[in-house]
Amino acid sequence: MLEKLDKQLTRRVVGQVDRSECAVINCWEQWTREGTHARKTGSGATRKITRREDRRIVRQALVNPTVTRSTIRADVVEAIVPQTIFRYLAEANLKFKRPFRALPLTPEHRQLRLQWCQARSMWNVTDWQKVVFSDESRFVLGTDDNRVRVWKRPAYDSRSTLIMIRGTLTDQRYVDDILRPDTLPWPARSPDLSPVEYVWDQLKRQMPSCHSVHDLELAVQDLWALLPQDNIRCLINSMPDRMAACIAAEGGSTRY
């Protein structure tokens, strides 16, 4: 019973201080053993960069809040991993936050989005489960010169293999290689109405560091194969809510 109580207290502390359970336990053990939780001089990993470079990283984030990790890493003399950059910024009380990137919508865009959603406002989850969604995205290796465009078709209970396209995807090539008859019309500038966009986001968050375009293609294929089908089902099941949100926003951008 005491052991169960200790675990409950530990979890409560973890939620309050935003630290891992292991860190909380180690801090408590040090306090009971030494009467202090202060770190010992010289403990922990050696810093890979100087304090001057540390301040430069923080200054970059303050001057340009949308700066990427790649840009910061390229400006640092020593090779450091992204987690190290996050840690240095956290020490300066700077937190990572994904910006809300809503596409600008003209009155015409809003009207078309609203009409499209209203026409499907009575569709239920079962109706949307019959739709096969398709989309393409770009995965970049270092620079735009080393890029791969990937096309996928997720459905409720199945998914297609990924189609890799190297080079530029022209309008005609898209029509010849990808588009098929009997397609559902889709309003322009409406990624928030498509469940596929979040799938791309999941894949890109998990992408490992790649050293060649071939490695990049293999990594995308592996992550796509490992993506749970339940994730795709949950996204497709959200379509009625997406329609309702767009109608409530009168065709404007939604939180999706």
Image (tube, rainbow, N blue to C red):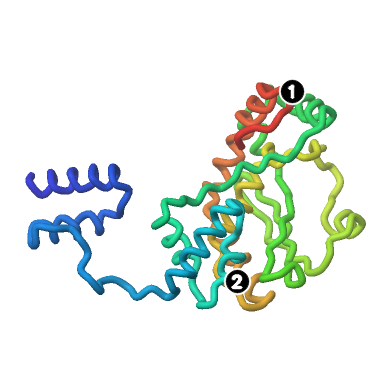
Instruction: Identify residue type, mark 1.
Output: Gln
Of circles 2 and 1, the one toward us is 2
Work out whether residue 34 or residue 150 is closer to the camera in this orientation and state it: 34
Q: Position of residue 7 (x, y in %)?
A: 17, 48
| Disc 2 residue crowd, few under 14, some 14–19, many 20+, Cα 10 Å | few
Q: Position of residue 43 (x, y in %)?
A: 25, 72
Furthest-right residue in this view: 172
Q: Position of residue 214 (x, y in %)?
A: 67, 76
Q: Is residue 122 left or right of residue 21?
A: right
247 over 132 or under it: above or below? above
Work out whether residue 206 or residue 54 is closer to the camera in this orientation and state it: 54
Give how far apart the Cα atoms at labels 2 and 1 are: 48 Å
Q: Give the SS element for disc 2.
A: helix
Q: Is residue 126 visible?
A: no
Residue 73, image quadrant: bottom right
Q: Which mark is residue 225?
A: none
Which residue was labeled with disc 2? 74
| Disc 1 residue crowd, few under 14, some 14–19, many 20+, Cα 10 Å | some
Which residue was labeled with disc 1? 118
Q: Is residue 237 visible?
A: yes
Q: Position of residue 17 (x, y in %)?
A: 29, 46
Picture residue at 50% right of the left edge, 66% below the top: 82
Q: Quadrant of the N terminus?
A: top left
Picture residue at 52% right of the left edge, 47% below the top: 97
Instruction: Identify residue type, mark 2.
Output: Ala
Q: Quadrant of the C terminus?
A: top right
Q: Is residue 133 left or right of residue 72?
A: right
Q: Earlier in the sequence, mark 2 or mark 1?
A: 2
Residue 250, image quadrant: top right
Q: Give the SS element for disc 1.
A: helix
Picture residue at 81% right of the left edge, 32% below the top: 106
